[in-house]
């Protein structure tokens, strides 16, 4: 009897400790704009945890996008960028930095929604990385009036989002002006198996954008044979 009780308690504890258990308590509706490395990794993980995922794509009917939808199962669909954004409460901009302004324009009215910005504006020039925009997250906030922008997930790789390492903790800094928005984003990031650190207002996103470029330099340009060894 005592053994059965112990097993039951262990089962309940391990359920409560698993990211998916928490995520399922209040599923979010998330539009993931961009169906590449980052979009696919986040959409697949969060769909598996019970969140509703709508991929926003330039080509929602294309085979690679439909493959992501199939992988996500019943919680996942795909639509054009505008339709996906309008149907969601949280929008992830998983697009190249050069496409950011046009992508935000395509979202339409996003007042009251949360925008997660993992973008690194990286310009590769003769062995160094130049910053393509001095403060991209703040620019996004200007292009999306009324939305709460949270800079997150730009300082680690999509592989760590898909499959975080078991032997160390990856910490994801979050910058944004709304504590409520940061708390909702933090819950999603923790559910990936990553830790979070609130680093203050959206103004500080510019420093995360610089960190992101340094991360890329160290892991991709400086360490071509040991990719993604370093993370913050
Ligand atoms: N790769 C990483 O490990 C990593 C880590 C942290 C942050 N980031 C940042 O996350 C963002 C996405 O990175 P990623 O590696 O997922 O990029 P990616 O594999 O190239 O995917 C980008 C996606 O954006 C969409 N897109 C919209 N407009 C586009 C355009 N004009 N040109 C090309 N694609 C366009 C495309 O999806 P549709 O064809 O469906 O529209 C495309 O699949 C980038 O800003 C990057 O800096 C990347």
Image (spheres, rainbow, N blue to C red):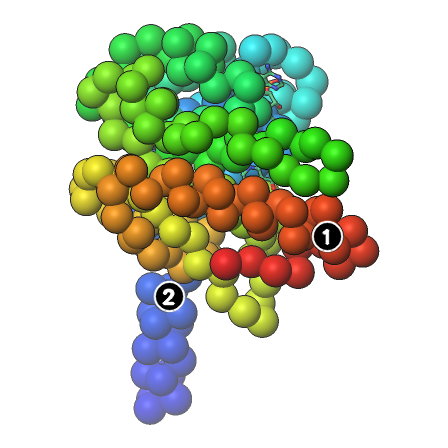
Callout 2: few (<14), some (14-19), or many (20+) C-alpha neighbours within 10 Å? few
* Residue 116 located left or right of residue 183: right
Which mark sits nearer the N-terminus, 2 or 1?
A: 2
What label sits on residue 222 in the rendered view? 1
Helix, strand or loop at label 2? It is: helix
Viewer-closest of 46 and 105: 105
Task: Classify 195 as above or below 70.
Answer: below
Classify the position of the N terminus by image quarter.
bottom left
Helix, strand or loop at label 1? It is: helix
Q: Position of residue 184 (x, y in %)?
A: 27, 43
Toward the bottom, the furthest residue is: 2
What label sits on residue 183 in the rendered view? none
Q: Position of residue 142 (x, y in %)?
A: 29, 19
- Cα–Cα gap, marks 2 and 1: 37 Å
Name which residue lies at 33% across and 28% down.
138
- Give the residue pinned by disc 2: 17
């Amino acid at each position: 009897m005592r053994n059965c009780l112990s097993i039951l308690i262990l089962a309940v504890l391990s359920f409560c400790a698993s990211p998916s258990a928490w995520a399922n308590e209040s599923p979010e509706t998330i539009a993931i704009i961009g169906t590449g490395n980052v979009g696919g990794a986040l959409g697949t993980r969060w769909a598996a945890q019970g969140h509703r995922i709508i991929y926003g794509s330039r080509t929602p009917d294309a085979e690679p996008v439909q493959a992501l939808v199939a992988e996500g199962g019943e919680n996942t669909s795909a639509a054009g960028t505008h339709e996906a954004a309008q149907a969601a409460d949280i929008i992830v901009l998983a697009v190249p930095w050069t496409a950011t302004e046009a992508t935000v324009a395509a979202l339409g009215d996003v007042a009251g929604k949360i925008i997660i910005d993992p973008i690194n504006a990286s310009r590769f020039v003769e062995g160094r990385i130049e910053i393509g925009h001095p403060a991209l997250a703040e620019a996004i906030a200007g292009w999306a009036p009324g939305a709460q922008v949270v800079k997150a997930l730009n300082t680690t790789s999509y592989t760590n989002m898909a499959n975080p390492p078991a032997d160390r903790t990856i910490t994801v800094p979050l910058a944004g002006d709304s504590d409520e928005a940061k708390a909702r984003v933090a819950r999603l990031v923790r559910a990936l198996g990553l830790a979070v650190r609130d680093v203050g207002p959206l103004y500080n996103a510019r420093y995360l954008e610089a960190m992101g470029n340094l991360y890329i330099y160290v892991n991709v340009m400086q360490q071509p044979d040991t990719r993604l060894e370093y993370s913050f």
